[in-house]
Image (cartoon, rainbow, N blue to C red):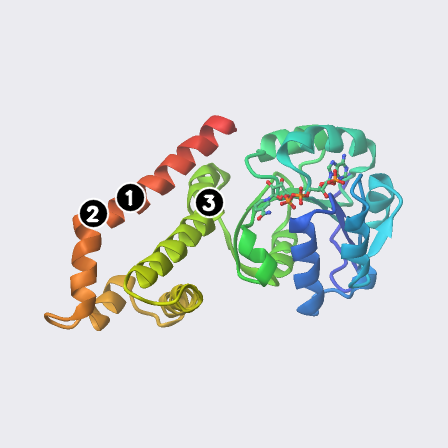
Amino acid sequence: MEVVPIPVDTYKLGFIGAGKMAESIAKGVVSAGVLPPSRICTAVHSNQSRRDAFQSFDVSVLSDNSAVVEDSDVVVFSVKPQVAKAVILQLKPMLTKRKLLVSVAAGVKLKDLQEWAGNDRFIRVMPNTPAAVGEAASVMSLGGTATVEDGELIAKLFGSVGKIWRADEKLFDAITGLSGSGPAYIFLAIEALADGGVAAGLPRELALGLASQTVLGAASMASKAGKHPGQLKDDVASPGGTTIAGIHELEKAGFRGILMNAVVAAAKRGRELA
Ligand SMILES: NC(=O)c1ccc[n+]([C@@H]2O[C@H](COP(=O)([O-])OP(=O)(O)OC[C@H]3O[C@@H](n4cnc5c(N)ncnc54)[C@H](OP(=O)(O)O)[C@@H]3O)[C@@H](O)[C@H]2O)c1
């Protein structure tokens, strides 16, 4: 079947798997005005509380997965990786090339997704948890017959919950090690910074607030200031000052090497699991 363009002004978006990631994306898409809730649908599997989560912002909750596929031009598979195969195989007869298929399932390869669906108009996206607050770092890779326009449409959808890049799928394990697992490394860093603040005499609440806001501010500068992070570090480390004394301790403990090792270990684990 011929690949027909998705009508950008009227297309409908469906989520198979009404979980946290689907909710974050749907909310982001609605609040950014990319799509009205009337053009988004999903279906609840077993946990009925997910119905309220989606209906609270007027997304249609249909009877089952088949109804979602039937009603959608763009179908996002947002189920857990271990059930993706069964769910896609069950819907296979309906997954024609008129539909653009998307998967956010971590570690599930395009080759398998396309084979299960019998359709290679597929795009794989690797988002991360900050999608819930509109600050995801997502990467997408286009399958066989996904068009440039399909890629633009998905970039716009996921762009409403953060930033999105395009990369070759062979980089996805490394991406998982960096942006997929990265939020957890930073949560650890925030907790440790706050512990340091408490050790230096701050009350816990103040220390946690300062640590989170400091990471947020530094990340914002690193992404917006147009300067290399090394330069930003040099800018705040005055001779014989407090910051360089702190940096010296981090370097003595191998701070950079530890972070590099964490990314490499998570990427390796991602490869093993795939
Ligand atoms: N959360 C993240 O930050 C993140 C980041 C990157 C990638 N991802 C990927 O996003 C996907 C979803 O993750 P999540 O965090 O949103 O998980 P989640 O909250 O557990 O959502 C998965 C949803 O799928 C539903 N489901 C299970 N079996 C189903 C079936 N046969 N048909 C339809 N729905 C079914 C579950 O419903 P019941 O609970 O009712 O069974 C649940 O609502 C995963 O593949 C994950 O790898 C997530």
Image point 22% across, 72% down: which residue? 235
Write down the residue under mark 1.
258
Please tell me whether mark 3 sits on a helix, a strand or a loop: loop
**Which amino acid does the dot numbered 1 rest on?**
Ile
Q: Quadrant of residue 124?
A: top right
Label 1 and label 3: CA atoms lie apart by 14 Å
Q: Is residue 190 above or below residue 93?
A: below
Image point 34% across, 59% down: which residue? 193
Q: Is residue 213 left or right of residue 17?
A: left
Mark 1 crowdedness (10 Å alpha carbons): few <14, some 14-19, many ≥20: few
Residue 73 showing in the rendered view: no
Label 2 and label 3: CA atoms lie apart by 22 Å
Q: Is residue 165 above or below residue 1?
A: below
Q: Is residue 210 above or below residue 70?
A: below
Write down the residue under mark 2.
253
Q: Which mark is residue 181?
A: 3
Q: Earlier in the sequence, mark 1 or mark 2?
A: 2
Q: Residue furthest left?
A: 240
Q: Which mark is residue 204?
A: none
Q: Is residue 112 left or right of residue 235?
A: right
Label 1 and label 2: CA atoms lie apart by 9 Å
Please tell me whether mark 1 sits on a helix, a strand or a loop: helix
Residue 180 showing in the rendered view: yes
Please tell me whether mark 2 sits on a helix, a strand or a loop: loop
Residue 158 image point, x, y percent: 61, 57
Mark 3 crowdedness (10 Å alpha carbons): few <14, some 14-19, many ≥20: some
